[in-house]
Amino acid sequence: MYRREVLDYLEKQGEPALRRVRGDIERAIEVLSQRPIGRPGRVSGTYEKLVIGQPYLIVYSLLPSDDGGEDDLVIMRIVHTSRDWPPGRWP
């Protein structure tokens, strides 16, 4: 599920839930941008990081930066952990 879809769903659940989950996801992305410490992902070329305190995985890739510095973090998906996820494919 893309980030926007997650947030749209949470908006329907109420403002407190939205703020809590959004904050947790944004903090996890901030940590990843400074130190990408996720495990190898189920889709080739990706990594996964669980959002602490939430049932969501951030799926991301690391791409070489244009300036030759540190790799760029690219968020591919935010996936609810209860989703069926066939090996090598997106849920």
Image (tube, rainbow, N blue to C red):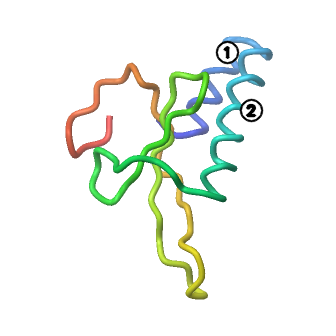
Q: Which residue is at 66% across, 59% downward?
A: 34
Q: How many labels does the image show?
A: 2
Q: Which residue is at 60% across, 87% downward?
A: 67
Report the Cα–Cα distance between label 1 and label 2: 17 Å
Observer-nearest of 75 and 49: 49
Return the x and y of residue 77 as percentages of the image width and height: 47, 44
Horizontal relation, residue 37 to residue 40: left or right: right
On residue 12, the disc is: 1
Label 2 crowd bin: few (<14), some (14–19), many (20+), radius 10 Å: few
Rendered position, 27 above or below 22? below
First in sequence, mark 1 or 2: give its number: 1
Locate residue 85: give its quadrant.
Answer: top left
Return the x and y of residue 6 as percentages of the image width and height: 58, 29
On residue 23, the disc is: 2
Rendered position, 61 above or below 88? below
Q: In which quarter of the image is the C terminus?
A: top left
Three-letter code, disc 2: Gly
* Residue at the left extreme, as displayed: 87
Label 1 crowd bin: few (<14), some (14–19), many (20+), radius 10 Å: few
Return the x and y of residue 35 as percentages of the image width and height: 60, 57
Horizontal relation, residue 49 to residue 83: left or right: right
Q: Which residue is at 39% across, 47% downward?
A: 39
Horizontal relation, residue 24 to residue 66: left or right: right
* Residue at the top extreme, as displayed: 13
Three-letter code, disc 1: Lys
Q: Do the residues labelled 1 and 2 touch (CB within 8 Å)?
A: no
Q: What element carries label 2?
A: helix
